[in-house]
Structures are given as C-alpha cells and as structure tokens.
Amino acid sequence: MKQIIAIGALTEAGENQLLYNYLIDSCDKPRPRVCFITTALGDNSDSLLLLYSAFARLSCEPSLLSLLFPETADLHGKVMNQDIILVSGGNTKSMLALWKEWKLDAILHEAYDTGIIMSGWSAGAICWFDQGLTDSIPGSFTPLECLGWLPGSCTPHYDSDPERRPTYQALIAERKMKPGIAIDDGAALHYKDSKLSKVVTSRLNAKAYAVGMERGTVMDTELIAHYLKKA
C-alpha cells in the first residue's frame, strides 16, 4: 500500500508529538527507520535538533538525508533503506528544484511505489500534489507545479495566515489552480493509494477542507477530522 501523510503545519511540541506518534503507528514495522529531508529549510541545525529530540522519544531510527552536505553518494540506497520519509516545511520552490537536480524526486517516487511512507509539513505537505499554494517568492502567494502524486491542489496554514484563504479561493475561481484541499495548522491528511483515507488533528479545533467550485462559487467543505487525544 502507498501512503502519504500531509501535515498543514507543526505547532507546539506536545501537539507535534501526537502527529509524530501517528506517523510511527502508521508503519507496520516495530522500529521503523525515519529519514528527515530538510532541504526546504537549508538543513537548519536548530530545526534538526528539535526533530531528533522529538523522535528520540519514539521507537524508531531517525536519520538525515542532506543535499547541501551529502554524507553519501548513494541517495538511492539511502532512501530505499527507509520506512518513513519526513519532509520539512520551508521554501517549496527551491526544494523541488534541488530534488530535480539531484534526481531525488524520481528516487522518492520509486520508494513511494514500494510502500515507503511519504510525509511532511507545509512545503513537505503540498509537494506531493499536482499544485501547491506557496509563499516561496517573498511578498506573494503563487501557484506552484508540484510532484503530481496526489490529484488537485493543496494549501497549508489555512487558519493561521489570513491571506491564504482568500488567495486560494480566488485562484481556484479564476481557474489558475485546481480545486483541492486546505489544511489548518496541526491537521494532517492521510492518503492511502492516492485516496484520502482520514483526517487527523493534534489540535482540537484544527480542520481540513475540500475547496472547489459549486454553482459558480468557491466553497469550503469541512472534512470529518479525528482528534488525536493525548494518552
């Protein structure tokens, strides 16, 4: 089975841990290998420290795949030896350009086809869709052609950035973006074999929406979400 878990955005540590727990539980391995790809953040050391600290609490084996300071020439071997790929937020446009240059996009697709779970937040959420709404170019939101593994478009930060909702809706109305999914911070979309299986949230009021045209008007349709309560 092919799986993608797309997270709108990380929030605070305790809430993020709920999403990380869900990610690990979605893998059928007792101690899955989790590979961080933080290209979009420029492999920021502070962000990596937070990730390693969070995943050290879980039964898994975390590691990093860096394109800025690669530790191996065998990117294919590195990726194919994982159980879960976790892609950070950051600059989606730059990230995808680097992936293409290193042919990492093709390697990741091969891994996805074999059942390795793909996941990520913000840039690491929208990258899997046909299109994403991005702020990769400072000062504006623009449609971005992405990997195309999931149909339609996607935007993160739907509740936290006041310009996201009107911009996304306007671009869909103008047919500059395909209809798609909008994700609040702390909400995650779980796709199985390219179909949305479940929406989970680490925050009680976080939501996800199907956004599309209905009788000539762009409409948000709230999706059923399952709150990941703390143990």
Image (tube, rainbow, N blue to C red):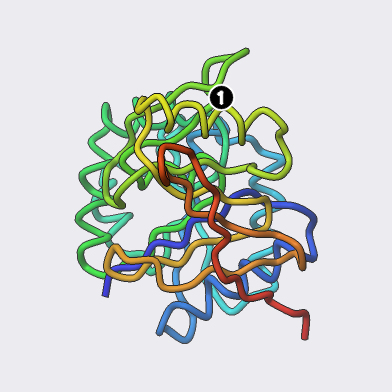
Q: Position of residue 150 (x, y in %)?
A: 31, 52
Residue at coordinates 58% horizontally, 79% vertically from top-left? 59
Count of picture labels: 1
**The N terminus: image quadrant:** bottom left
Q: Where does label 1 land, which residue?
A: 135
In the image, residue 134 sits, relative to residue 33, either above or below, namely: above
Q: Position of residue 22 (x, y in %)?
A: 58, 74
Residue at coordinates 50% horizontally, 57% vertically from top-left? 63
**The C terminus: image quadrant:** bottom right
Q: Nearer the viewer, residue 124 or 29?
A: 124
- What amino acid is at disc 1? Asp
Residue 105 as seen in the image, left or right of residue 225: left
In the image, residue 14 sits, relative to residue 37, either above or below, namely: below
Residue 25 as seen in the image, left or right of residue 146: right
Residue at coordinates 36% horizontally, 25% vertically from top-left? 176
Q: In what element is the residue under mark 1?
A: loop
Instruction: Tell me if mark 1 has few (under 14), some (14-19) or many (20+) residues whose alpha carbon lies within 10 angstroms of its own.
Output: some
